[in-house]
Image: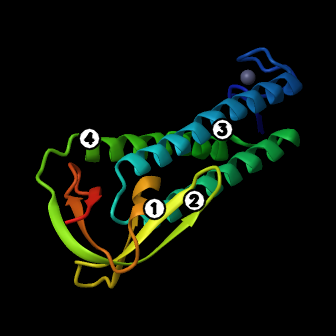
Amino acid sequence: MTRCLNCGSERGADICDACGLSSTGAELSLRKRLLNRTAIFVLGALAFIAASVRYPPLELDGVFIFIGVLFFATLGVAIWVERRALRHTEVEAMKRIYYGLVPIPWLLAVLLVLNGALDHGKPEVERERVVGKFAMAGALPIRRLVVTSWREDHRLEHISISRSDFDSYHSGDIVDIKVQGGLVGIPWISGISSP
Ligand SMILES: [Zn+2]
């Protein structure tokens, strides 16, 4: 049994009874849709990164590793579906998995924005010492301040900071870090200042 790559219904002949496309037409239609959804997915990943810069979660590096794994796994599924479509083999199950993965970065971006933008709680101010900093240039520059941790089970914290803050803090400085609880319980950093 083969299924139409376009509409997913069973087909006996080259022309699909349900949508009227030939197997070649159905393949083109599927690949076009894959491309569109991939664009939506990539934009979602960028929206997520923008949200995590604006409302940086305390566990930012863990969040980035998670989104990185999700990103490459999802693109891997997309490539797999496309290669199977080229050979006109069964793609229905994997296609549904792929379509299910596409909105996830958008949902996570919305979650981070809600967590930060609607968090009207008073921040906890933690006074800590800067022990280092590092920056990586690139399309998505990364700047982190390494400070001693206020959490019992952590030695250091890596705080995402703006370029101007990056230039003005140095090892040994004492800083006040504003930590918010987050509307949905994801702790995030709302600011850094000198005491
Ligand atoms: Zn069809």
- Mark 1 residue element: helix
Question: Does 31 sit above or below residue 57?
Answer: above
How far, Cα to Cα, is label 2 from label 4?
A: 24 Å
User: Where is residue 86, by image quadrant?
Assistant: top right
The mark lying in front, picked from 3 and 4, is: 4
The furthest residue to the top? 20
Question: Does 176 sit above or below residue 90?
Answer: below
The furthest residue to the left? 122
Label disc, if present, on residue 38 of the rendered structure: 3
Question: Does 24 sit above or below residue 84?
Answer: above
- Ligand 1 shows up in the quarter that is top right
- Mark 3 residue element: helix
Residue type marked 3: Thr
* Residue contact between numbered discs 3 and 4, judged by CB atoms under 8 Å: no
**Assess mark 4: CB under 8 A from ligand 1?**
no
Q: Residues within 10 Å of mark 4 (few under 14, many from 20)?
A: few
Check the picture and name the quadrant holding the C terminus: bottom left
Q: Which residue is mark 4?
A: 117
Check the picture and name the quadrant holding the N terminus: top right
Residue type marked 4: Ala
How far, Cα to Cα, is label 2 from label 1?
A: 28 Å
Q: Count how many numbered circles sit on residues in the image.
A: 4
Residue 154 visible in the picture: yes
Label disc, if present, on residue 68 of the rendered structure: 2
How far, Cα to Cα, is label 3 from label 2?
A: 15 Å
Q: Which residue is mark 1?
A: 167
